[in-house]
Image (cartoon, rainbow, N blue to C red):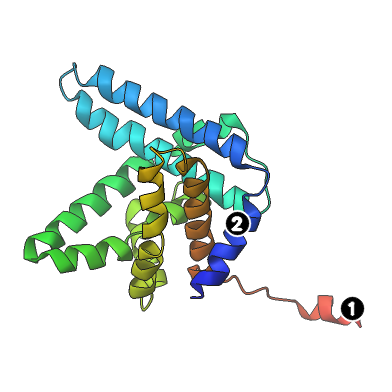
């Protein structure tokens, strides 16, 4: 995994789209905060917000950035595109959190390792609507096998940018967040299994 190449691609892919990506992030951030605040006054409201609303918005973001790195143009309405499969997003989020928690009971390190093993689960779901949560998790585990350390280092490579966001009171995040999200979308595209195109004998004959 070439980190420099993934990040260089991301910089090109988000050019001219920072404004709309900021609007999408703002919509999701404001509505998530509002939902957390309102539902905190309702019994089990926190659970609904954490495991239903937040995962659906998370799926929306993943779809937005997969579209961006594919050359698509996001629109504000994309902020809600994850709600068409919110139940699957809930199951993926709940199970990955639960499994990571169980591994963390053994020790901190196994929990961290497994969090990277499960990190592509939502991306798998984003491209395979209706796929079961366990299937998404298992595909993520296969994809990240032998690459978890690389994903960890990729995350560390953004540490300086995270500091910049803090120093600028979050202003730098207008560019940094799209940069990071596009980079991770590129990493997913690099790791996912490539489809093998099967050409029939008739097609070969016709080409000749």
Q: Position of residue 208 (x, y in %)?
A: 92, 83
Q: Is residue 10 above or below residue 57?
A: below
Residue at 38% from the left image edge and 70% from the top image edge: 144
Q: Is residue 158 left or right of residue 187?
A: left
**Element class at badge 2:** helix
Check the image and name the residue furthest to the left: 106
Cβ atoms at labels 1 and 2 below 8 Å apart: no
Which image quadrant for residue 173?
top left
Q: Is residue 103 above or below residue 182?
A: below
Which residue corresponds to mark 1? 207
Q: Position of residue 108 (x, y in %)?
A: 13, 64
Q: Position of residue 22 (x, y in %)?
A: 53, 36
**Element class at badge 1:** helix
Q: Is residue 129 visible?
A: no
Q: What is the tally of numbered marks visible in this picture? A: 2
Estimate how packed mark 2 is, as few (under 14), some (14 to 19) or many (20 or more) residues with alpha carbons within 10 Å.
Answer: some
Estimate how packed mark 1 is, as few (under 14), some (14 to 19) or many (20 or more) residues with alpha carbons within 10 Å.
Answer: few
| Nearer to me, 6 or 142 | 6
Residue at 54% from the left image edge and 48% from the top image edge: 65
Which residue corresponds to mark 2? 11
């Amino acid at each position: 995994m070439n980190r420099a190449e993934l990040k260089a691609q991301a910089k090109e892919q988000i050019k001219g789209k920072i404004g709309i990506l900021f609007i999408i992030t703002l919509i999701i951030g404001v509505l998530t905060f509002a939902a957390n605040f309102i539902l905190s006054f309702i019994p089990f409201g926190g659970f609904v917000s954490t495991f239903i609303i937040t995962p659906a918005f998370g799926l929306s973001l993943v779809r937005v950035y997969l579209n961006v790195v594919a050359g698509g143009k996001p629109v504000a309405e994309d902020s809600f595109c994850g709600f068409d499969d919110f139940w699957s997003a809930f199951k993926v989020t709940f199970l990955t959190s639960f499994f990571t928690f169980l591994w963390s009971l053994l020790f901190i390190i196994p929990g961290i390792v497994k969090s990277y093993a499960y990190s592509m689960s939502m991306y798998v779901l984003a491209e395979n609507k209706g796929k079961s949560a366990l299937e998404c998790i298992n595909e993520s585990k296969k994809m990240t096998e032998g690459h978890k350390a690389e994903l960890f280092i990729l995350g560390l490579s953004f540490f300086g940018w995270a500091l910049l966001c803090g120093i600028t009171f979050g202003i730098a995040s207008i560019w940094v967040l799209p940069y990071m999200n596009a980079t991770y979308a590129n990493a997913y595209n690099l790791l996912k299994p490539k489809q093998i195109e099967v050409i029939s004998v008739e097609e070969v004959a016709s080409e000749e």
